[in-house]
Amino acid sequence: MLRVRGLIKSFPTSTARDGADQAAFLSGAARRRVVNAVDLDLAAGDYVAIMGESGTGKSTLLNLLAGLELPDAGEIAVAGQSLATLDDDALTRLRRRSMGFVFQAFHVLPYLSVADNVALPLRLNDVPVPEIAPRVQVMLQAVGLGERGGSRPSELSGGELQRVAIARALVHRPTLVLADEPTGNLDPHTAAQVLQLLRHSIKREGAAGILVTHSPEAAASADRVLILKAEGLFERST
């Protein structure tokens, strides 16, 4: 489902960005490497957590895996498709078809109903209209919101909004689910429920899932925990 080899990403230092040392910037000397020599393989149903100190590049790594940023070196393949071979339009289509995203801020559209929010990936992927409502209802039932399809997001709690986000991320049966601090805005009890739901949903749909988090409690919901360091991505020792 996901294959990553030798992934490297660096950014200009603040000095280089400010133009104080353009020669160093052009030579590459004034760049800070935030993702370094990352290797990762995920199969269907694999669910891993990635932890690391602030500034170690966790969100950057997710952006690279989603094709939102280009690596300096290395290879990323989703469902056997190398991202390096795709132009911007093809990357957009791959994200729509093969990826699902869950964010800390929910990103549920306030002017759409719950059902219409969940239906968005299906509409973007040109799923036949008669199939959309039944698939949306199945996902809403799966996340415990079967009776809330007609509700507006303003009528839901934070935990319910995150459940909507999970349903939306999985309704089109993606290959890869990327979750970036999805419980950061939730109380501990609700966070535990959402994490259990996310794990169960990824397993049920046969996706590969990555949870980026700073919380050991959240990371414990995954099959295994990986630590992102300056030297690369490492399995957390027992």
Image: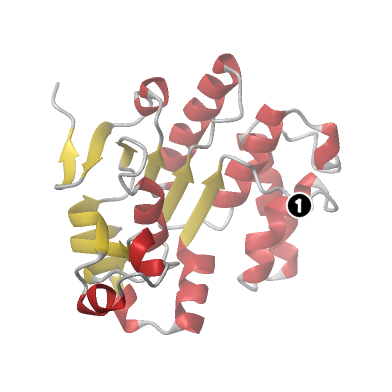
Q: Position of residue 232 (x, y in %)?
A: 17, 48
| Quadrant holding the C terminus | top left
Q: Is residue 234 above or below residue 15?
A: above
Please state if 144 lies on the left or on the right of 41 as rendered: right
- Residue at the image point whose x is 26% and y is 79% from the top: 26
Residue 39 lies, with reference to residue 140, above or below; the image says below
Residue 32: give x, y in percent of width and height: 26, 58
Give the image quarter of residue 79.
bottom left
> Could one spot residue 193 in this view of the protein?
yes
Identify the image quadrant of the N terminus. Answer: bottom left
**Colour logic:** secondary structure
Tell me residue 48's x, y (percent).
31, 39
Describe residue 28's horizontal placement relative to residue 60 as left or right.
left
- Label 1 sits on a secondary structure element that is loop
Is residue 127 among what the camera can see?
no
Local crowd size for mark 1, using a 10 Å CA cut-off: few (<14), some (14–19), many (≥20): some
Q: Which residue sits at x=21%, y=62%?
A: 7
Residue nearer the viewer, 106 or 116: 106
- In the displayed structure, does residue 162 sit left or right of residue 55? right
Q: Residue at x 37, y 38 (%)?
A: 54
Q: Which residue is mark 1?
A: 109
Q: Tell whether 81 sits left or right of 207.
A: left
